[in-house]
Image: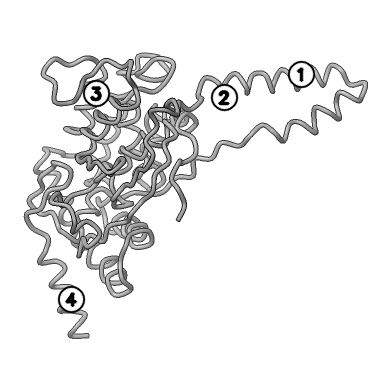
Amino acid sequence: MRRASSFTSSVLSRTFSTVHDGGAVNFNPRLLQVALFCSSRTNNSNSGHRWFSPLLDSFSKSSAQPVFLGLAGVVASMATAASVYAKEPPPVEIMPKEVVLYQYEACPFCNKVKAFLDYYDIPYKVVEVNPISKKEIKWSDYKKVPILMVDGQQLVDSSAILDQLGEKILPGKTKTSVADEDEDEETKWRRWVDNHLVHVLSPNIYRNTSEALESFDYITSNGNFSFTEKITVKYAGAAAMYFVSKNLKKKYNITDERAALYEAAETWVDALNGRNFLGESKPNLADLAVFGVLRPIRYLRSGRDMVEHTRIGEWYSRMEKAVGESSRIKA
């Protein structure tokens, strides 16, 4: 018992002065920095249309021509929708040969990178980093996640990763980045994701003890923790992050965390201005950035509330279909 208490104290003593993907937080634990941006996995599965084949065959052999035509119309409509939301894999000749993502599963910046890789159907391996020891990235001078290795080249910082990958696989795209002073619409909203949207997430997912425990249940189930760390982190971490969230509210001048989340969601829908995506008929980098950072919280209580109480649900569903299944290579 004394050893467990000592371990907990050691864990919580690491809760100061670290930075995650460029975002400094005064009370940001090495162990729990992952928890500032808790996530919940989504199953973005798009069912194929092959199961229609036997149905069409049976109808074509019957005299039920009107029914067949009606079903054919449905199939055609679904095929049209599928083509609208089709993935956009790059040409084979410029497809990266080996991509490895060093990540925390519960990290919106890592999910932003995964949204890009998934949408462009770029196969990638994942190395889950232990947030305590970080032994998986000891080889790197950069001690934050995500780190993306692309054919032996190290890319860091989620927004910079999207810029650099975009240059590699989207040769016809105008080269802009969130570091540019002259903003186009896409760059403006990518910057908004990094400077505003991500900061309203933590106060929401840790706003009370039950939501903090819900978040840490996911973190400990999917993170790279030892058995002892898993037990300690779930309860000590949830308690610590509950108080951290209160500090974050003050830091970012958030009075009502849910209202701030809903306002952010509505702000994004207003930016769409009736379009399916900010990129018009297909997602652009801003769409992928917003989707990426929201995907971790979508099926937590805060994400469910967001979809229920704002207009963002339809856009989010379109993005799930467009991004489709993960291109992650299963170990």
- Check if mark 4's residue and mark 3's residue have beta carbons within 8 Å: no
Element at label 2: helix
For the point 26% across and 15% down, the residue is: 174
- Residue 76 pos. (x, y %): 67, 19
Q: Quadrant of residue 289?
A: top left
Please tell me whether residue 36 is drawn above or below residue 81 in the rendered image. Answer: below
Q: From mark 4 to mark 1, how far is it between C-alphas? A: 65 Å
Quarter of the figure with the C terminus: bottom left
Residue linked to disc 1: 70
Dot 3 crowding, Cα within 10 Å, few <14, some 14–19, many 20+: many
- Check if mark 1's residue and mark 2's residue have beta carbons within 8 Å: no
Q: Earlier in the sequence, mark 4 or mark 2?
A: 4
In the image, 213: left or right of 78? left
Residue linked to disc 2: 82
Q: Amino acid at mark 4?
A: Phe
Nearer to us of marks 2 and 3 is 2
Q: From mark 2 to mark 3, how far is it between C-alphas? A: 26 Å
- Check if mark 4's residue and mark 2's residue have beta carbons within 8 Å: no
- Residue 281 pos. (x, y %): 44, 16
Q: Earlier in the sequence, mark 1 or mark 3?
A: 1
Label at residue 7 = 4
Nearer to us of marks 1 and 2 is 2
- Residue 301 pos. (x, y %): 37, 47
- Residue 233 pos. (x, y %): 26, 66
Q: From mark 1 to mark 2, how far is it between C-alphas? A: 18 Å
Q: Earlier in the sequence, mark 4 or mark 3?
A: 4
Q: From mark 4 to mark 3, how far is it between C-alphas? A: 42 Å
Please tell me whether residue 283 is drawn above or below residue 206 in the rendered image. Answer: above
Element at label 4: helix
Residue linked to disc 3: 189
